[in-house]
Image (cartoon, helix red, strand yellow):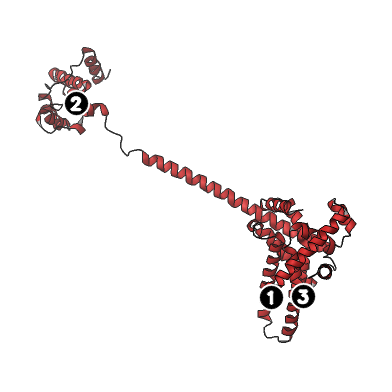
Amino acid sequence: MKDRDADTSLMQHLSGEPPREAFKQQVLRDSTAEFIRVWQQRSAWRRTGIAAAAILIAGVAFFGGRLSVPPTLPVSVDVATQAGAEPDGVNVPSELVAWLEAARLFRQLGMEDRMARAVERAGRLLPVDTVIANGQSGQVFAAARSIENQKKLMELMGMSGPRPSAESVNQILAQSFGD
Amino acid sequence: MDTDSETFVIHAAQTGSQQAWRQLFDRHFDAVYRFCLVLTGARHDLAEELTQQVFVTAARLIHRFDPSRAAFRAWLFGVARNRHMATRAGEQRRKRHEESSSRGSSEMVERGGTDLLVHEALARLPSHYRIVLDEKYLRGLSMNEIAAKSGASVEAIESLLRRARAGFAHEYEQLRTSE
């Protein structure tokens, strides 16, 4: 195709009656309205997606945090360490010994109910999870599991352990008498 | 509007700019209408309906357009072709039994094929060639008017027009031989 042919062809196919102005404006309005509608719809989808992602991340973080915590709290490290430190026996907390001393005192005074409460408090302080099955210590733990074994427990109270101070015994007695 | 600025406008429209959409509409409306006129066999009512469909569809799908793969006008022509084929397929199903229309439509398609090549060759040109040919043949502006509008000399516009026509002839021959 030569230059003159191209000119003729373009003149023939492109010239002619232009589209009506009213029609052009109508198409512009309709297409712009569609353009706005689609854009708003896409923006809404984007916002929804971001919100869903945020909720998902928060949910994963929450449940991840929950699952990372152990279901039960670990046993007191102090007691376990003390129990493990002496393979020949059990080193009991001084408060336990103080309660047992108080129970012995109540027994001597004939105050059976107070004695029972003191033994019960002492029983709660026993390191049950570190029971050493053999020997005298095992018998102490087994006896301390119930109040019914109070007498047996009292017979075994001469076991090794730190002696309570007079001040702590007085404090425990005061608590026992409800002061 | 050169290639880079058109790419910029397309990108702005793809990110929701209504002003960019209006610029694209103004730039391509006349050419799309003429293309639709050829597709519909010079029936103005059908051409208007098709043009409306093309721009509403383009407004809906512009975010999918990839400037690196095709010119925007060529994409609009593709939308026009698809809409027209869909409409014709529906009509042909309804009028399959009418033999009288078959001869006339085949003649129209043959003639329309040549006309479509002119529009498609034009759409494949670099935008600075296409724009000057649009101004000259589609909008019927004189050399002086084009020069004044673009801020170039009349001689520069004449030279640009010659190169644009040569480019058009090259594209047209390529399209014709590939068919």
Give the residue at x 74% y 78%: B110
Q: Circle 3 sits in a helix, a strand or a loop, which is it?
A: loop
- Judge whether A156 appears above or below B124 on screen: above
* Amino acid type, callout 1: Arg
Splitting the image into 4 quarters, where does residue B108 fall?
bottom right
Closer to the eye: label 1 or 3: 3
Q: On the image, numbered disc 3 is attached to which residue?
A: B41
| Chain letter of the residue beneath label 3 in the structure image | B
* Amino acid type, callout 3: Gly
> Residue lying furthest top in this view?
A166
Q: Circle 1 sits in a helix, a strand or a loop, which is it?
A: helix
Observer-nearest of A110 and A88: A88
Q: On the image, numbered disc 1 is attached to which residue?
A: B88
Q: Residues within 10 Å of mark 1 (few under 14, many from 20)?
A: few
Residue A26: image location, x then y, percent: 78, 61
* Amino acid type, callout 2: Ala
Residue B64: image location, x then y, percent: 63, 58
Residue A79: image location, x then y, percent: 23, 27
1 and 3 marks in contact (CB < 8 Å): no
Residue B109: image location, x then y, percent: 73, 77
Q: Is residue A97 left or right of residue B66?
A: left
Dot placed on the residue nearer the N-terminal end, 1 or 3? 3
Q: Quadrant of the C terminus of chain A?
A: top left
- The dot on residue A85 is 2
3 and 2 marks in contact (CB < 8 Å): no
| Chain letter of the residue beneath label 2 in the structure image | A
Q: Residues within 10 Å of mark 3 (few under 14, many from 20)?
A: some
Give the residue at x 51% y 44%: A54
Marks 1 and 3, how far apart in space?
12 Å
Marks 3 and 2, how far apart in space?
102 Å
